[in-house]
Amino acid sequence: MTPQQPLIPLRPVADIPPAPASASGIVPQSSDTTLQDTHGRRFSYLRLSVTDVCNFRCNYCLPDGYQCSDTPEPLSLDEIATLAQTFAALGTRKIRITGGEPSLRKDLPEIIRILKNTAGIEQAALTTNGYRLSKQIDDWVAAGLDQLNVSIDSLDPQQFQAITGHDKLQEILSGIERARELGLTRIKVNAVLLKTFNESGLSQFLNWLKTTPVTLRFIELMQTGDNAEFFAAQHVRGEDIKQQLLQDGWQPKLRGSHDGPAQEFYHPDFSGQIGLIMPYSQDFCKSCNRLRISAQGKLHLCLFGEEGHELRPLLHYASADIQQHIRTLLGQKKESHYLQAGRTGAISHFAMIGG
């Protein structure tokens, strides 16, 4: 898909009113009903993919670009509303909109608004590659966006283009500045660590954080079904970065109840903070608090799980039935992703279910 291609068409749907409960009677329950698996982990965070289409060609994800497929159309607004209400009733308090690239959906502001108007959902977040950020951030904030994550794998324009296939770095940085002007304070920048592309750019990122109040998150490259050779050549250990930060005076930060798996650090001399996502670290999965829904409505218990579980056909059933089905499925969640053992599950690239 090229950047000039039209936005993804969607079915017309009825407006979703900002009511505390849906017509089906789904209402959020008390926090003691929060989803819990057989390993004692509680799940208050949902990553909701709204499309698997992406217009970037990141070398660690879609080096050949998005390949069109015959998969069903993405979740409609009504289906998204039902899912949000269902998971809110199960104790979900944060929903992150992911892709592919979510901004390729022309109704993204409506999706944000639906999540914000769902009783029980406290945080509506968005992860984007930033391609449309400077043009659309005003609409996203007006719809109620609480948190923004933007992928920037290098602050060097040439390296950025080499990784993503697009010369958009300065425009994306301008979009982040506009988000700050609009009062959005919860901004994170994601960078996948790559040995021959951006590992040497750590100092450039640190200089940027001196005066920029964002959280920069370094993500350790993970092996998927399609990238074994690339992974072997480019993998950088997050633990090495962590030890360097500690030696340079960075201090660990306490993890919030709905935060993802990043270990975050702050430094008194820096306006920004740093997070490290290290899936190969010991006990990484013990802090898991998230579930994933694909753009076609499948529940993924783990990013590296063997399969997705169909929820879409159930969305017209009674809410109690859907909730019980989700609880039953959660009993199948494994203790670990076993990524350290070389298992990559069914995932071939991260655009499939939003990372």
Image (spheres, grey):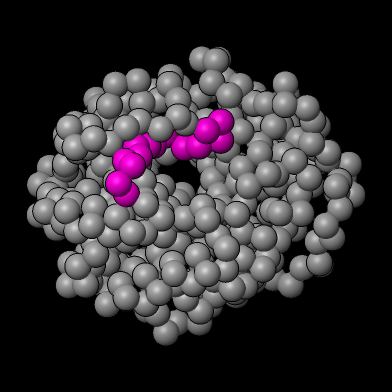
Locate residue 207, reporting x and y percent. Answer: 23, 57
Residue beneath the point at 53% across and 41% down: 292
Q: Residue furthest top?
A: 39
Residue beneath the point at 18% across and 52% down: 202
Q: Nearer the viewer, residue 348 or 302?
A: 302
**Vertical placement of 110 versus 21: above or below?**
below
Quadrant containing the N terminus is bottom left
Locate residue 172, reporting x and y percent. Answer: 38, 71
**Vertical placement of 98 versus 161: above or below?**
above
Residue beneath the point at 61% across and 59% down: 145
Q: Nearer the viewer, residue 140 or 207?
A: 207
Relative side of 49 to 311, left or right: left
**Vertical placement of 103 versus 346: above or below?**
below
Magenta segment, prevailing SS (helix, strand or loop): loop
Locate residue 106, reporting x and y percent. Answer: 59, 74
Question: What is the magenta range?
Answer: 256-270
Q: Residue furthest bottom?
A: 4
Relative side of 341 to 212, left or right: left
Q: Quadrant of residue 68?
A: bottom left
Is residue 297 visible to the viewer in this orientation of the structure? no
Q: Quadrant of residue 28?
A: top right
Q: Is residue 353 magenta?
A: no
Is residue 30 visible to the viewer in this orientation of the structure? yes
Relative side of 8 to 262, left or right: right
Residue beneath the point at 32% across and 41% down: 267
Q: Nearer the viewer, residue 237 or 176?
A: 176
Q: Residue furthest front?
A: 269
Q: Quadrant of residue 12?
A: bottom right
Relative side of 157 to 309, left or right: left
Q: Nearer the viewer, residue 147 or 13?
A: 147
Locate residue 169, reporting x and y percent. Answer: 30, 72
**Vertical placement of 258 versus 313: above or below?**
above
